[in-house]
Image: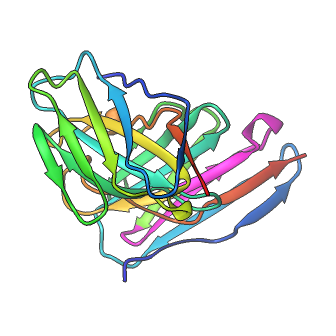
Amino acid sequence: DVKVTQSSRYLVKRTGEKVFLECVQDMDHENMFWYRQDPGLGLRLIYFSYDVKMKEKGDIPEGYSVSREKKERFSLILESASTNQTSMYLCASSPGTLVYNEQFFGPGTRLTVL
Amino acid sequence: LAKTTQPISMDSYEGQEVNITCSHNNIATNDYITWYQQFPSQGPRFIIQGYKTKVTNEVASLFIPADRKSSTLSLPRVSLSDTAVYYCLVGDPSSGSARQLTFGSGTQLTVLP
């Protein structure tokens, strides 16, 4: 059974802290994605990676960075957390070289920045 | 990028067929239409994808008219467990850009007993 796991379901951090959100997939997928989900705004793409060490900005990359050192792991980094980054963060992966292939999502991390 | 428009919410009763329509007036020739389902506290789950006419799987059917400016997700005989948010996406499978992965706000379907 395909699986995408995220390091935490709930996370509380303080303004200015550096925050790491980890995502691991066990399906040997090439593509990995980070989204944030806010009420009324749906899912918005933050960053996308199509290969190890490769990344592409999504719609809202400001305030975020990513790291993909291994194929199965994709990390989202908030360099200096701010209250407007309080949100649900969803990681996904998809196979192959086509970005639009079926995505498999993790359960999400609800981040609260105080 | 093709923008999509869906109703914000819909209510239905158990056992009924539900049709959720998505408008995508500026869909491009190479674009496909994909639908995802999201339950509370979970990530979205792929339901169905199509290019034209009709596609059916064990979960749903997808109807796409000839002009492809809209599409309709059809859920037969819904149950309470079909209560979820449904997202319509439009994009080109051959494109290497992730910028087309716009989920929008989706349609909240509530199935009533």
Question: In screen coordinates, is A52 left or right of A83?
Answer: left
Front residue of B27/B80: it is B80
Q: Is residue A70 above or below residue B92?
A: below
- Examine the rendering and report whether any part of residue A52 can be seen: no
The x and y percentages for residue B40 are: 63, 57
Q: Quadrant of the C terminus of chain B?
A: bottom right
Tell me, yes or no, if residue A105 can be seen here: yes
Point out the residue furthest to the bottom here. A1
Q: Nearer the viewer, residue B19 or A62?
A: B19
Q: Nearer the viewer, residue B24 or A64?
A: B24
Q: Is residue B22 left or right of residue A85?
A: left
Q: Residue at x 35, y 30 (%)?
A: B22
Residue range highlighted in magenta = A70-90
Q: Residue at the spot x=69%, y=69% of the render?
A: A8
Say whether residue A28 is left or right of residue B66: right
Count of numbered marks: 0
Residue at horizontal 30 percent and vertical 74 percent from the top:
A28
Q: Is residue B36 above or below residue B96?
A: below
- State which quarter of the image contains the N terminus of chain B: top left
Image location of residue A94, percent across then percent down: 31, 60
Which residue lies at the image location 20% right of the left edge and 39% below the top edge? B63
Q: Is residue A73 magenta?
A: yes
| Horizontal and vertical percent position of residue B71 | 26, 32
